[in-house]
Amino acid sequence: RLYHRFVDILAGSWDESDSQALFQSKIRWLKDAGNSEQGMLSLLKAMFTSGLQPDTDVFDNLLSCIPASHVLAEFPGLWEDRDFMLATIEPDASVVKYASTELWKDHDFTLAAAKRNISTLQFAPEEIRAHGDFMLTAIEQNIRALDFVASKLQADHKFMLAACKLGGSATLHFAHSNLRESREFMLAVIELDASALPYVAAQLWLDEMFLSNLQVYWGRGPHLSLSCNHG
């Protein structure tokens, strides 16, 4: 009991004269003393109260002992801290749920988060996942971003065609069925990549205009004529 009381005293002792280095020493001591999570959180709270902001090394040391979600739950002020949020999402994408609304509005932050852990996009607000330019950038960065495209974009001709240019015909797996039934859209995709043929809807194989354009495609090679009216 005396030993644990000493840990509590150490964790709670903090004044403005303490430095980052001393804080690191206390963190290491608590870690060696038995990974006292509550003690470390108390120490961090005392540090914030003093007005001293922990640096990256301090947080790295802290997060090696305590789950980031526990730290974020205890300190809402960190929800707006871009660097801290980015440092914690790589091992656990779910911590991005704590990110503030302002951080989500920052596309640079959201892209950086997705680069570190693509699964963070599943927690992004709908308006982010429905933003065409943003999602195309995310797809270019990591093709797995297609898993998180909003349904609105999955039915958008212009967006899905651009996505196919980045990800190839397999991107059609994520396209709305209405697009795969569209003569104009499917001809445009096939012009990009002939391997899109297996994604053609059954009804298009009965469409004479569609078949006529396919014949032009096979006759001319890699360039499909789209000059006629497909309306």
Image: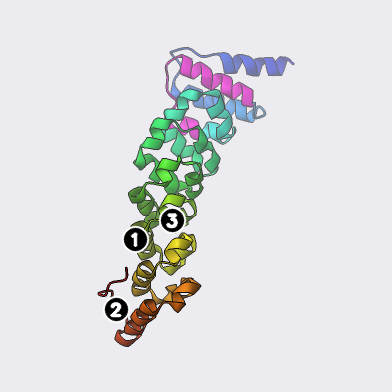
Dominant SS in magenta: helix
Q: Is residue 140 left or right of residue 68?
A: left
Q: Position of residue 121 (x, y in %)?
A: 47, 46
Q: Compare marks 3 and 2 and give the one earlier in the sequence.
A: 3
User: What residue is pinned by disc 1?
Assistant: 162
> Around disc 1, counting alpha carbons within 10 Å, would you say few (fewer than 14), some (14 to 19), or many (20 or more)?
some
Residue type at mark 3? Gln
Give coordinates of residue 148: x percent, y percent.
48, 50
Q: What residue type is disc 1 on?
A: Ala
Which residue does the image show at 33% across and 50% down from the upper left?
A: 133
Q: Residues within 10 Å of mark 2 (few under 14, many from 20)?
A: some
Label 2: which residue?
A: 223
Is 54 in the magenta?
yes
Sequence-first tag of 2 and 1: 1
Q: Residues within 10 Å of mark 3 (few under 14, many from 20)?
A: many
Residue 218 in picture, x, y percent from top left: 35, 85
CA separation, marks 1 and 3?
11 Å
Quadrant containing the N terminus in the rendered view: top right
- Location of residue 158 (image quadrant): bottom left
Identify the residue position indicated by label 3 in the image. Answer: 154
Relative to residue 23, is residue 183 depicted above or below? Answer: below
Q: Residue at x 59, y 34 (%)?
A: 67
Q: Is residue 132 above or below residue 63?
A: below
Q: Quadrant of the C terminus?
A: bottom left
* Proximity of marks 2 and 1: CB atoms separated by less than 8 Å: no
- Single out the mark in the foreground, 1 or 3: 3
Q: Foreground: 181 or 50? A: 181
Q: Give the alpha-carbon distance from disc 2 to disc 1, as whole Å.
A: 17 Å
On the picture, is 182 further left or further right than 33?
left
Give me the residue at 34% from left, 79% from top. 213
Residue extent of the magenta highlight: 37-60
| Label disc, if present, on residue 185 of the rendered structure | none
